[in-house]
Image (cartoon, grey):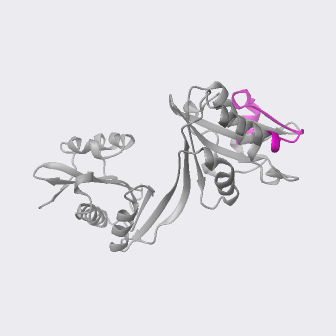
Amino acid sequence: MKYKLEKGTKDKVNKYSNLTYPSYREKLGKLNDNIIVLGCDLQSTPIGLALAETSSAGNKAEILSLFVIPEFREQGVGKLLLEGIEKELLAKNCKEIKVVYTENTTTSAWEKILAEQNWNSPEPRMLVARSDCMAKENQSLKEYVCKILKKIPLPSDFNIFPWVELSDKNKDEIAQQNKFKYPKILNPFQEEDKIEPLNSLALSYQGGVVGWLVNHRLDSATIRYTSLFIKEDLKLVGRTPIGIPLLFNGFLLQIEKSEAKQGIFTVKADNLAMLRLTQKTIKPYLASCKWSKQSFKQLA
């Protein structure tokens, strides 16, 4: 079969819109110099799509999605698209390209293509966990969460309260990082319009805010547990890991008071304590627990 690669232009990209994630379809409709679209056709029928975006400086790029419809997989289409997107980026003087993906049934085939194209060996980036059973009627999960909270109670000199009750003064202190610093990825003020008020929580110690659990509502059925942070010197008090009662109080509020049945959270690969907690304590109630990986390649 003869496959044809086609560079996406404004008048051609619509036919490929179903071959990428809904969140990226907007990029297809607003093409600019930083967006590279490469489609693959068979007798004018779209069968694959590669979508990449370069940095503002243009020297780095990321493959946002690469998709081949199931009946044409393992026939060289994915490799053809990857080779094509690399050539397009090289022509733009891009020096480095990366890809981030989550494990699924196509992972082994995808990683084989990356190896054949001389990409770096993929590395774990973060663990992606999802629960589908955080519903009011799930008494066994509620009992389990309550058991954990009883086993690992919050010390009496700490207090958990709703994030929406945070004072403007506390917000300013956190935003300006006056009393402690936190990684950019744990900034609690990201996507403020989507913050879930029900179980986003603040943590105080001796009157001052020292941590938070900030969650976001993705849709009517799903709450994402986005940012769990506790001041470094207070993460472990005695033998109590403070993050556990904070996180499990968030779980309990969703189970008791929300109609959202799904919960999603991610754990960075270097966060060993949270990985252990997920594997030992939370995993029995997860619908899926998969690694997100990343790989790089120097183009020039």
- Picture coordinates of residue 56, whole percent (x, y): 42, 54
Where residue 198 sits, quadrant-wise, is: top right
> Is 215 covered by the magenta stretch?
no
- Give the quadrant of the N terminus: bottom left
Above or below, comparing residue 109 to residue 242 in the picture:
below
Residue drawn at the location 59% of the way across and 30% of the way down: 135
Where residue 272 sits, quadrant-wise, is: bottom right
Residue drawn at the location 60% of the way across and 56% of the way down: 268
- Picture coordinates of residue 153, whole percent (x, y): 83, 41
Above or below, comparing residue 11 to residue 142 in the picture:
below
Residue sitting at the far front: 140
Q: Is residue 37 visible?
A: no
> Is 169 covered by the magenta stretch?
yes
Left or right of 192? Residue 250 is right
Q: Relative to the observer, which residue lies in front, 181 or 252? A: 252
Q: Relative to the observer, which residue lies in front, 71 or 40? A: 71
Where residue 4 sits, quadrant-wise, is: bottom left
Residue drawn at the location 16% of the way across and 53% of the way down: 41
**In the image, which residues are magenta?**
150-174
Image mark count = 0
Left or right of 214? Residue 62 is left
Q: Relative to the observer, which residue lies in front, 107 or 5? A: 107
- Picture coordinates of residue 146, whole percent (x, y): 75, 36
Residue drawn at the location 22% of the way across and 63% of the way down: 75
- Give the quadrant of the C terminus: bottom left
Q: Is residue 155 visible?
A: yes
